[in-house]
Image (cartoon, helix red, strand yellow):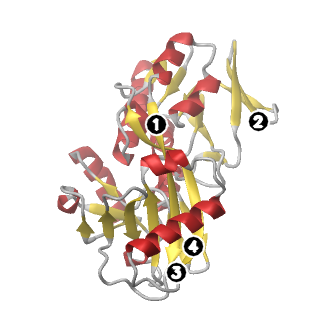
């Protein structure tokens, strides 16, 4: 059985590894240059910045065991972060990737066939399975099964001929988020490692350089609020970086010589209204869909969705 998985984030790679372990030949596609999805990291002169999810936390014993396996392998580390402003967060155990958060998805990729920088634009059902075409309308090949593991709005162009699924996926509501990496000339000792704010522009500030294995060069990841991100969704990254820097400086007047390194737009960052079921699968079509947005908004939700879809496919094949 050969299977195409579209999306190299936690959901897609979790599903891909389970399917590979069951004997399938799996090819993973992603429009980005590497793996990660919300766990992506970006390089800068001093090292790596985790510009997606700043850390991983487990709400179930299953996901905790999954993370702990990677802890034992040296792919993750405990992060005893100081937290301010979000009740309940401080009680959770946090993990980070080594040397960056995308290390866990790079580990999951393993020996899977991977085609990065490849946007799948359309699927075509044929007698032997599915034809996949890129955004240049070039045929990439034929696969017997397809798993789609991308944000809900990006699923829609790939399933538009299946109206029941279209209605379900359209019911999902996802929110955008702008983030900016800001470097300061000196440490800001009054800030915790992770800080949540009741502020019209800035929702969270994470001290990236406080994470084990990172450069101690005073780099902070500034996450904008949902409303502000929506209102400024189509502005250029350079403008966003400057605006978030100004608000960061205004919040902390003692900050001097700060410099914005970059801004990144997560157009589909968080789920506001989830699908309410762990995955979609059509046995007659041999087509499935998974993602964090099926269950919620966390990395753990993505893992659960990918794991449950792959488990269902494996069981159905027996």
Cα–Cα span, label 2 and label 4:
33 Å
Residue at 33 percent across and 63 percent down: it is 95
Disc 3 and disc 4 in contact, CB within 8 angstroms? yes
Rendering coords of residue 161 (x, y %)? 63, 13
Q: Is residue 123 above or below residue 62?
A: above
Mark 4 is surrounded, within 10 Å at the Cα level, by few (under 14), some (14 to 19) or many (20 or more) other residues, namely: many
Cα–Cα span, label 1 and label 2:
24 Å
Residue 29: quarter of image: top right
Cα–Cα span, label 3 and label 4:
7 Å
Q: Determine which residue is flagged by label 2.
A: 135
Cα–Cα span, label 4 and label 1:
27 Å
Mark 2: secondary structure? loop
Residue 198 falls left or right of residue 284: left
In depth, the one of 285 and 197 nearer the eye is 197
Q: Determine which residue is flagged by label 1.
A: 174
Count of marks, rendered view? 4
The reply to whether residue 144 is visible in this rendering is no
Q: Determine which residue is flagged by label 3.
A: 258
Label placed on residue 260 = 4
Mark in front: 2 vs 4: 4
Mark in front: 4 vs 1: 4
Mark in front: 3 vs 1: 3
Q: Residue at the far bottom: name it.
A: 186
Mark 3 or mark 1: whose residue is earlier in sequence: 1
Mark 3: secondary structure? loop
Residue at 48 percent across and 84 percent down: it is 217
Mark 3 is surrounded, within 10 Å at the Cα level, by few (under 14), some (14 to 19) or many (20 or more) other residues, namely: some
Mark 1: secondary structure? strand
Q: Quadrant of the C terminus?
A: top left
Rendering coords of residue 27 (x, y %)? 62, 39
Cα–Cα span, label 3 and label 1:
32 Å
Rendering coords of residue 108 (x, y %)? 48, 51
């Amino acid at each position: 059985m050969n299977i195409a998985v579209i999306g190299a984030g936690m959901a897609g790679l979790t599903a891909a590894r389970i399917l590979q372990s069951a004997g399938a030949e799996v090819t993973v596609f992603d429009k980005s240059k590497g793996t990660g999805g919300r766990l992506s990291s970006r390089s800068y002169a001093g090292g790596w910045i985790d510009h997606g999810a700043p850390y991983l936390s487990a709400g179930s014993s299953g996901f905790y065991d999954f993370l702990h396996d990677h802890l034992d392998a040296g792919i993750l580390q405990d992060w005893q972060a100081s937290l301010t402003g979000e009740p309940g967060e401080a009680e959770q155990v946090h993990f980070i990737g080594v040397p960056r958060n995308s290390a866990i998805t790079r580990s999951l990729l393993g020996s899977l066939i991977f085609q990065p920088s490849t946007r799948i634009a359309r699927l075509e059902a044929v007698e032997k399975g599915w034809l996949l075409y890129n955004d240049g309308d070039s045929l990439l090949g034929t696969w017997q099964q397809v798993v789609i593991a991308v944000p809900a709005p990006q699923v829609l162009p790939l399933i538009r001929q299946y109206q029941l699924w279209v209605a379900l996926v359209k019911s999902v509501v996802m929110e955008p988020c702008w983030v900016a990496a800001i470097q300061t000339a000196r440490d800001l000792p009054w800030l915790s490692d992770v800080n949540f704010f009741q502020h019209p522009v800035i929702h969270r500030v994470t001290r990236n350089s406080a994470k084990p294995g990172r450069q101690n060069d005073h780099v902070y990841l500034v996450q904008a609020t949902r409303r502000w991100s929506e209102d400024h969704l189509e502005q250029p990254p350079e403008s966003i970086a400057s605006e978030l820097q100004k608000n960061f400086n205004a919040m902390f007047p003692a900050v001097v010589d700060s410099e914005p390194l970059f801004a990144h737009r997560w157009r589909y960052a968080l789920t506001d209204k989830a699908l309410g079921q762990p995955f979609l699968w059509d046995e007659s079509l041999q087509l499935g869909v998974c993602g964090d947005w099926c269950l919620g908004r966390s990395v753990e939700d993505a893992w659960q969705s990918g794991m449950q879809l792959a488990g269902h496919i494996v069981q159905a094949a027996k």
